[in-house]
């Protein structure tokens, strides 16, 4: 059972879950899928304080997503940033997953409903490891999905948009029902895009490779964090298209995401990746990442919003 904060935020006001979270059955987003959301983690750091990781970048992406689909929240970015802090404080949560979501409310019920109000909510819940307790150490087993990521002219890959997630849900269901942990999707040309809710990196010959933003992927904030940390560690990182055979022949593969953090991949479609265990570069980056988000590494204060 989800352990969620009983206080939610709506357009600048805190209320309890029942009154604040109750949505009309005729909420436009519920029917047509036009809505934007974010997933953000707040960690309790090693010295006891709570910090939200890269909050401003997540809220900027939320507003970018809204911009793509012509939604205009009635609140400002600064209000949503403050709302995330307030939700944690009001719920007395030292660590949580935060879910800001901008919805088109009820009003007109046709597909074209430009005058319906846009409501922005923030909820919080406790979320442990996204892919299971052993995933971060032992790695996961993935399948290359039979579903492709949306063609760039079919959907907005750079938007974290509600309806687009049918594609992720289908791919994840397929992978789980086939006995795997996660799906890896290719784009319509067959190049590797990303996981159902994560970006992907491969390691080959000591270098890090990840698909470019043009490969129909979300511009992951963890992806950007990993690229920054890797370069600080002296690693070469390139953004280039990756083929399926390159995936199988990689020395290491890992997935990145706010929820999934840095999760090693140990097998793809029954082919072991490298030694079949977490590789040394993945381990070094995972260790550094956890030290930055929740440890004692204060080298990036601009990424932390103290609560
Ligand atoms: C489809 C998809 N790709 C990648 C990511 C990783 O993005 P981030 O690192 O910003 O959480 C997510 C998670 O938000 C996602 O849903």
Image: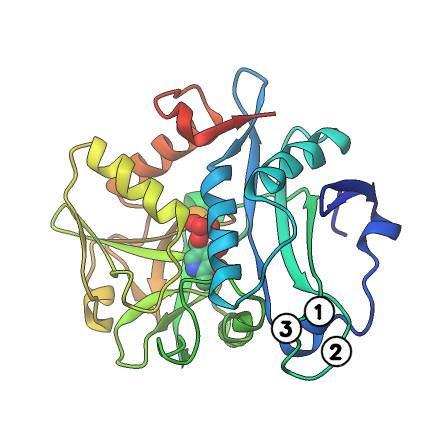
Labelled disc at residue 17: none
Residue located 39% across and 21% down the image: 297
Q: Are marks 2 and 1 in contact (CB under 8 Å)?
A: yes
Judged from this view, the residue extending furthest toward the top is 47
Q: In this rendering, does residue 274 appear at all?
A: yes
Camera-side residue: 261 or 59? 59
- Distance Cα–Cα, label 2 vs label 1: 6 Å
Residue located 25% across and 61% down the image: 211
- Distance Cα–Cα, label 2 vs label 3: 9 Å
- Distance Cα–Cα, label 1 vs label 3: 6 Å
Quarter holding residue 129: top right
The relative height of residue 11 versus residue 112 in the rendered view (above or below) is above
Q: Which residue is mark 2?
A: 108
Residue located 40% across and 45% down the image: 222
Judged from this view, the residue extending furthest toward the front is 115
Mark 1 is surrounded, within 10 Å at the Cα level, by few (under 14), some (14 to 19) or many (20 or more) other residues, namely some
Q: Which residue is mark 1?
A: 116
Residue 137 placement (x, y as % from top left): 43, 43
Mark 2 is surrounded, within 10 Å at the Cα level, by few (under 14), some (14 to 19) or many (20 or more) other residues, namely some
Instruction: Give the colouring mode of the picture.
Output: rainbow
């Amino acid at each position: 059972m989800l352990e969620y904060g009983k206080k939610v935020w709506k357009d600048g006001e805190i209320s309890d879950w029942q009154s604040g979270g109750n949505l009309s059955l005729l909420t436009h987003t519920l029917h047509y899928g036009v809505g934007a959301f974010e997933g953000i983690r707040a960690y309790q750091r090693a010295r006891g304080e709570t910090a939200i990781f890269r909050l401003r970048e997540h809220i900027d992406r939320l507003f970018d997503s809204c911009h793509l689909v012509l939604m205009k929240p009635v609140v400002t970015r600064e209000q949503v940033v403050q709302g995330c802090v307030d939700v944690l404080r009001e719920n007395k949560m030292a660590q949580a997953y935060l879910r800001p979501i901008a919805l088109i409310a009820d009003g007109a019920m046709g597909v074209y409903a430009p005058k319906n109000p846009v409501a922005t909510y923030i909820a919080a819940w406790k979320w442990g490891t996204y892919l299971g307790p052993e995933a971060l150490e032992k790695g996961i087993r993935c399948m290359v999905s039979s579903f492709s990521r949306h063609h760039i002219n079919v959907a907005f890959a750079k938007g974290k948009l509600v309806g687009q997630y049918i594609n992720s849900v289908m791919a994840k269901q397929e992978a789980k029902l086939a006995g795997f942990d996660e799906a890896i999707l290719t784009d319509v040309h067959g190049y590797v895009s990303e996981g159902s809710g994560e970006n992907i990196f491969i390691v080959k010959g000591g270098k890090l490779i990840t698909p470019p933003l043009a490969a129909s992927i979300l511009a992951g904030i963890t992806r950007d964090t990993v690229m920054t940390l890797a370069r600080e560690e002296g690693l070469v990182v390139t953004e280039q298209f990756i083929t399926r055979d390159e995936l199988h022949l990689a020395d290491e593969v890992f997935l990145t995401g706010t929820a999934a953090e840095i999760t090693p991949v140990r097998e793809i479609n029954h082919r072991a990746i490298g030694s079949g265990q977490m590789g040394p570069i993945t381990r070094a980056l995972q260790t550094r990442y956890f030290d930055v988000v929740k440890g004692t590494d204060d080298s990036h204060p601009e990424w932390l919003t103290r609560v």
